[in-house]
Image (cartoon, rainbow, N blue to C red):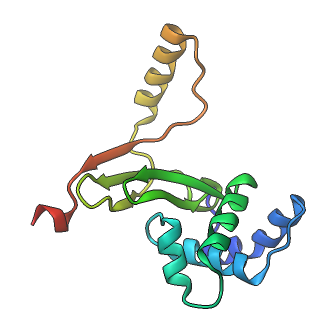
């Protein structure tokens, strides 16, 4: 279940504290930047949105890696522009992405596009043919964004 934006902000210090970390000003700013974005961001994009003086790019990399380690962030995709990060699905809800093959733009799709019966069939087939138990899934659709089609 996804947390509302205000609830996200309230639980972050506790989640970091449980792992032995403090929510410093730069960490808060990085999390707020990612939470405010409508699409997953690269480290360069996060750094650019922070403005000057708050955190250098190395600090953004370190913070992103820390937030991945403690489970607050997830890697949404890796494109030519680099890895893109977003809040973990516990905060955003389960969703999928569309990715432009020309410019690398990535956008969220609302909710899960796979019907429950289709997902159940896929899990069953994978379990039977590969003896692999699927615990979660991710769907990425590739194509051309509106700007690249023009």
Residue 124: x and y, percent?
Answer: 50, 17
148 displayed left or right of 110: left
Which image quadrant: the C terminus? bottom left
Relative height, residue 150 to residue 96 (above, below): below
Q: Is residue 77 left or right of residue 92?
A: left
Question: Where 41 falls versus 25 (above or below)?
Answer: above
What residue is at 47 percent from the left and 73 percent from the top? 45
Q: Residue at x 54, y 14 (%)?
A: 127
- Residue 63 image-quadrant placement: bottom right
Above/below status of 90 relative to 140? below
User: Count of labels shown?
Assistant: 0
Quarter of the image holding residue 140? top left
Pick whichever, 70 or 1, lies toward us: 70
Q: Report x, y in % for residue 64.
A: 65, 63
In-front residue for pair 128/1: 128
The quarter of the picture where residue 20 lies is bottom right
Left/right placement of residue 60 relative to residue 119 reads: right
User: In the figure, 48 relative to 145: above or below?
Assistant: below
Residue at left offset 79%, top offset 79%: 24
Nearer to me, 124 or 134: 134
Residue at 49% x, 17% y is 126
Where residue 78 appears, as percent x and y from the top left, is 45, 50
Viewer can see residue 116: yes
Residue 110 in the image: state x and y as whole percent.
41, 57
The residue furthest left is: 150
Residue 96 visible, this angle = no
Quadrant placement of the N terminus = bottom right
């Amino acid at each position: 279940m996804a947390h509302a934006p205000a609830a996200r902000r309230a639980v972050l210090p506790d989640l970091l504290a449980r792992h032995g970390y403090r929510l410093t000003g730069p960490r808060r700013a990085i999390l707020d930047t990612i939470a405010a974005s409508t699409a997953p961001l690269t480290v360069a994009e996060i750094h650019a949105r922070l403005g000057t003086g708050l955190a250098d790019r190395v600090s953004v990399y370190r913070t992103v890696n820390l937030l991945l380690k403690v489970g607050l962030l997830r890697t949404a995709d890796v494109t030519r522009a680099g890895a893109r990060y977003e809040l973990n699905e516990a905060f955003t809800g389960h969703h999928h992405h569309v990715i432009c093959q020309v410019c690398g733009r990535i956008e969220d799709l609302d909710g899960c596009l796979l019907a429950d019966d289709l997902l159940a069939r896929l899990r069953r087939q994978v379990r039977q043919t590969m003896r692999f138990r699927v615990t979660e899934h991710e769907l990425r659709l590739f194509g051309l964004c509106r700007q690249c089609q023009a």
